Image: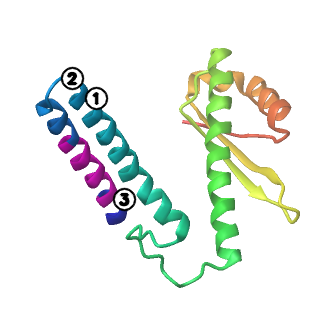
């Protein structure tokens, strides 16, 4: 990041210097000429890092470790991240659906899995409910089975 910070610092210092020079320039034709030269200077200062980047000589100041990540580890990490995000999203959606039907729950946990062809399936659904909501267990089972094609485990707390 030191390369980017250096470019930013150079552009800031150049802009400040041009502003000061523009403020003390005499009015009239000299001021217009000075403004044109300063504008061209600032453009050159901003284009130079881009030119260096295109030519391959720009150093971002970042070192990338040479150890490679295996494709299997990368795939596993990606699958875990997708599963965690999908589980979270499904849990929020199911909680909202139950709340919309005025069914009180304490919490719920949806566990997902990945089958051999890379598809995601619902491995289990656990719903923790207070005793007063236990009378609506059949309604909860019906809703979850309809939405997730999986029979939930309802646990009374």
At label 1, counting other C-alpha atoms closer than 10 Å, the crowd grade (few under 14, some 14-19, many 20 or more) is some
Disc 3 element: helix
**The stretch drawn in magenta includes residue 13:** yes
Q: Position of residue 43 (x, y in %)?
A: 40, 45
In depth, the one of 47 and 115 nearer the eye is 47
User: Vertical placement of 85 versus 100: above or below?
Assistant: below
Instruction: Give the vertical position of 106 relative to 45 (above or below).
Output: above
Question: Which residue: 33% across, 57% down?
Answer: 7
Residue depth check, mark 3 versus mark 1: number of the one nearer the observer? 1
Task: State how many labels appear.
Answer: 3
Circle 1 sits on which residue?
Answer: 32
Q: Quadrant of the N terminus?
A: bottom left
- Judge from the rendering whether residue 3 lies leftward or rightward of residue 29; answer left or right: right
Q: Are marks 2 and 3 in contact (CB under 8 Å)?
A: no
Return the residue at label 3. Answer: 4
Colour treatment of the image: rainbow
Q: How busy is the neighbourhood of tag 3: few (under 14 within 10 Å), some, or many (20 plus)?
A: some
Secondary structure under the numbered disc 1 in the rendered image: helix
Separation of residues labelled 2 and 1 (CA atoms): 7 Å
Q: Position of residue 53 (x, y in %)?
A: 50, 64
- x and y percent of residue 26 in the render? 13, 28
Residue annotated with mark 2: 28
């Amino acid at each position: 990041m030191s390369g980017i910070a250096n470019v930013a610092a150079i552009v800031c210092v150049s802009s400040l210097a041009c502003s000061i020079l523009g403020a003390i320039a005499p009015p009239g034709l000299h001021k217009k000429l000075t403004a044109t030269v300063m504008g061209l200077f600032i453009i050159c200062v901003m284009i130079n890092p881009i030119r260096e980047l295109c030519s391959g000589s720009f150093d971002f100041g970042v070192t990338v470790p040479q150890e490679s990540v295996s494709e299997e580890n990368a795939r596993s990490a990606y699958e875990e991240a997708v599963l965690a995000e999908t589980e979270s999203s499904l849990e929020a959606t199911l909680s909202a659906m139950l709340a919309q039907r005025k069914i009180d729950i304490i919490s719920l946990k949806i566990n997902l899995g990945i089958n051999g062809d890379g598809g995601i399936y619902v491995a289990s659904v656990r719903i923790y409910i207070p005793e007063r909501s236990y009378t609506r267990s059949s309604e909860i089972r019906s809703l979850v089975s309809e939405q997730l094609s999986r029979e939930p485990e309802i646990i009374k707390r």
